[in-house]
Amino acid sequence: MDLGRPDQTFVCFLEIGNTLSKIARFNGRYPGPAYSDAQHCVMGAQAVLNEGGTNADAALFLLHDAHEWALGDTPRPAANLYDGVARDIYGDDHVADSICASKAAWDEEIYAAAGLPGPEAWTKRQRAMVKGMDDRMCRAEAIALFGPRAAEQFPKSTTPKTTGAIRSWGAMKAEEEFRKMAYRLIGEDRVLEQAGIAAAARALR
């Protein structure tokens, strides 16, 4: 798979769930077992539903980190560091912009494979909904994983209406819950069809 040429025929939501289930939030720097990006996406999508959002709204959130299946997760502090070092040494601070552009290119293909509008086509409400839930989940997760002092690192916000407490599910459950949520929000037929398309595309390379 050529990371520089995003292609929706390579997108497999089952594989995305598997990969994200093994990527730890906050670089795994907290005590205890890993809390995965897959769990973050599932719990946030359920919170969107619990707060009155539509299935389409929740689907947008479920896939907002799906590009990490291809590109991995670069924590924001690390991206900011790379940007600052590039500016200081090379006089060019576009590293973070390059990361964002690469993510955006894969996002368009991933959402297209799901039959959903890509971020470039989102309404202001949709954009605010996804970013708002992401920020609120991040704060709630940090408090749950690091302790109450973590709240000092974030602007105040309302706690998302998650189903259950924020505690690590482990990779196997996170993958399974991501698959079930993808079936619910994207459609089982589309998820399985896309898995077949991805398998065929790779067989031809």
Image: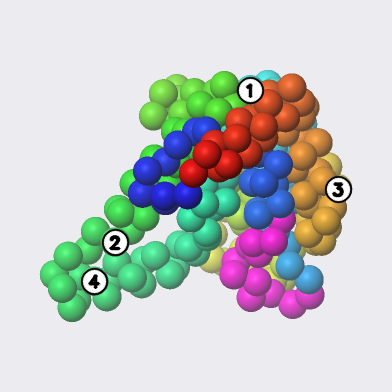
x, y percent for residue 183: 76, 29
> Could you tell me if the residues under marks 3 and 1 are in contact, i.e. CB atoms within 8 Å?
no
Q: Write the residue at 77% across / 49% down.
A: 175
> Vertical placement of 189 versus 34: above or below?
above
Residue under label 2, please give it. 95
Mark 3 lies on residue? 164
* Residue that carries the numbered disc 1 in the rendered image: 56
Which residue corresponds to the image point at 39% horizontal and 29% vertical from the top-left?
120
Distance between mark 2 and mark 1 Cα atoms: 32 Å
In-image side of 49 versus 139 (left or right):
right
Q: Which residue is mark 4?
A: 86
- On the image, the x and y values in percent for residue 141 come to 68, 58
* Residues shaded magenta: 21-32
The single residue placed furthest to the left in the displayed view is: 91
Q: Say which quarter of the image contains residue 195.
A: top right
Relative vertical location of residue 155 with respect to residue 49 in this rendering, above or below: below
Q: CA distance from mark 1 to mark 4?
A: 39 Å
User: Marks 4 and 2, Cα distance to the nearest angstrom?
Assistant: 7 Å
Amino acid type of the residue that numbered disc 2 sits on in the rendered structure: Val
Query: Please, what secondary structure does the residue beneath circle 4 have?
Result: helix
Q: CA distance from mark 3 to mark 2?
A: 38 Å
Image marks 4 and 2: residues in contact by CB distance under 8 Å: yes
Q: Secondary structure at mark 2?
A: helix
Q: Amino acid at mark 4?
A: Ala
